[in-house]
Image: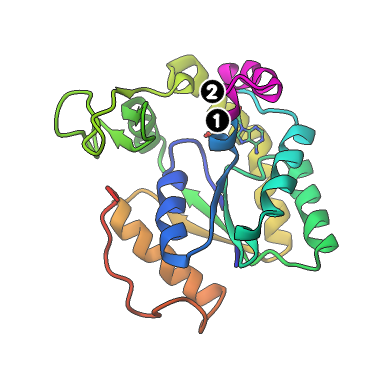
Amino acid sequence: MKLILIGPPGSGKGTQARLLSKKLKIPHISTGDILREVVKNKTQLGQEAQAYMEKGELVPDNVIIEIIKERVSRPDCEKGYIFDGFPRTLTQAQMLDKIFKEKNKELDLVIQFKISDESLTKRLSGRLICSKCGADYNLYFKPPRVGDICDRCGGKLLPRQDDKKNVVINRLKVFKNQTKPLVNYYQKQAKIKDIDADKKSENLNQELLQLIDAEVNPNGLPEKQSFPAESAEE
Ligand code: AMP
């Protein structure tokens, strides 16, 4: 099963992709996470990407495509994967189609996360990430039990560098300009479905599973009809 989650920064794609990955037993591929890792490791690619990320701009398409090609060729991707934050431009989507064609594979479904500007602002301004284990929190919706300490591992919680106000404004602008054309592209392929992301994480996850079940693979999901409501903390 090959899924793409599209939505503005802060729409909850990452949290949902992680939950779906566990339930569907296919990897979650976030280009943002991969890029943050290479930046942290100070590789040459990381240094190149950092300059774009700090400004909230997109990393060049050719860099992203190389990352994706390498990632999807790993054995854990054989049964499928969930893309989160990729593709982000029309060129990336076209290049992805080329990769699928070469491998004789097909994209199953694109899910667009729709969310109000008000929720988006709260989600981004309240977001905190554990500097040790990467767990995510939100001061408004999912606060840590104690101060700025991770409930799971005791690591220090920090805002993401690119969640600063001026960078967020640019990321949203970039999303509107560059990522929105993707919606038309996938509409023409009749591959895209919308989901109302303005709701609690557990409810959203249940709706996503139902949507995927109905659209992609009526018989093939593990334990059809019996997905337990799962907490977003996991
Ligand atoms: P994200 O965590 O998905 O919001 O991504 C964080 C940042 O990484 C973005 O603001 C971009 O600078 C960069 N990035 C992530 N994915 C892509 C992509 N598919 N194409 C270009 N840049 C990306």
Disc ID at residue 40: 2
Residue 191 or residue 161, whichever sits in front: 161
Residue 32 or residue 127, whichever sits in front: 32
Please, what secondary structure does the residue beneath circle 1 have? helix
Which of the 4 image quarters holds residue 92? top right
- What residue range appears in magenta? 36-56
Using the image, determine if residue 28 lies above or below residue 223.
Answer: above
Q: Amino acid under label 1?
A: Glu
Quadrant in the picture for the N terminus? bottom right
Q: Is residue 43 magenta?
A: yes
Name which residue lies at 66% across and 40% down: 88
Residue 138 or residue 76, whichever sits in front: 76
The reply to whether residue 4 is in sight is no
Question: How many other residues sit within 10 Å of disc 1, few (<14), some (14-19) or many (≥20)?
Answer: few
Name which residue lies at 31% across and 28% down: 126
Q: Dots 2 and 1: beta carbons under 8 Å?
A: yes
Query: Residue 17: x percent and y percent?
Result: 47, 52
Name which residue lies at 29% across and 34% down: 138
